Amino acid sequence: MSRTREASPREPFAYLKRRFHVLAVDDEPIALTVIKESLEDSWLFHVTCVASAEEALEELRKGGYHAVLSDLVGIDGPDGDMWCIIREYGKCLPVIGISGMANRDTTSEAMSRGAFWVFDKPVVFTCERFKNKLREAILDFLFVRKHVHPPSAAYMQAYGALEEGPESVEEWAGFLGVGRRELRRMLDACSFEPRHLLAAHGIVSRVFECADKDWPQCEECPDELRQDCQYKGEFYYSHRTVMDDLLSGWGKGGPRPPAG
């Protein structure tokens, strides 16, 4: 029996509600409140707030986080180490630094130690640039998986092509000048079929694009985009294992390799 899906306009993406777990680290309660309210207002994120590096490290060791937003000043860790979070987790989680005293040297050092990006305070957490950078960080770690799979040039090239937004496996392979079989070989470090990864990438990209829009105003969306949402929603329900494995909170020390 076929299923009819006529519930709320958000339903195609309802399974992603509060799906991405972000750790916010700042010694200023007001800053934490602003971060939490701004990100959770888009319904896609769940934010846990801590006020010290020690608390942050304790939380991160539990696993289950997708990104870290950390102040760079005033949250020194053990032995006054202000870089402890980036040093321990910058290679396995996207860490975005925030600092009211950031200068070129601080920013450069944070990036060289593994930070994904650094923003100067005051940060407008509702601004497009900030949310785009967080989106970029999560997509990068979800699909590029730099520190999970062998760093072969072919593998990184195949995932880099996702930035072009291919709509099919053939188009994806075409960007690379290879055939379907060659694309599969390039992705042999991953247990998922290329078409599954491609569809999953499309789902998450679409969700990020729509999460901050004035829903439930989906009737204002062009018909082809609403049909695309329905298709992507159905893909999730029929490939739940693929999506859950990609999107579940990453384990202790960062992303866990695909089950296989």
Image: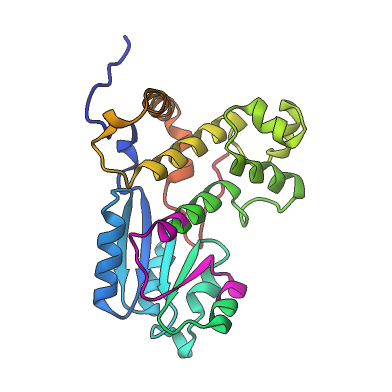
- Give me the residue at 31% from left, 57% from top: 39
Q: Is residue 202 magenta?
A: no
Q: Which residues are magenta?
A: 110-132
Q: Is residue 193 visible?
A: no
Can residue 79 be spotted in the picture? Answer: yes
- Name the residue nearer the viewer: 136 or 66: 136
Q: Which quadrant: the C terminus?
A: top right
When the figure is inspected, residue 246 is found, relative to residue 57, above or below; the finding is above
Q: Measured from the top left, where is residue 6 in percent x and y?
A: 24, 22
Residue drawn at 68 percent across, 39 percent down: 187
Q: Residue furthest bottom?
A: 79
Q: Is residue 236 left or right of residue 139?
A: left
Q: How is the image coloured?
A: rainbow
Q: Is residue 140 above or below residue 28?
A: above
- Residue 179 is drawn in which quadrant? top right
What is the count of numbered marks?
0
Determine if the magenta segment contains residue 125.
Answer: yes
Q: In the displayed structure, does residue 184 sit left or right of residue 142?
A: right
Quadrant holding the N terminus = top left
Q: Which residue is painted at 58% across and 83% down in the image?
A: 105
The picture places residue 115, in percent across and down from the top left corner, at 54, 69
Which residue is outermost to the top? 1
The x and y percentages for residue 168 are 60, 27
Residue 70 at what x, y percent from top left?
A: 41, 72
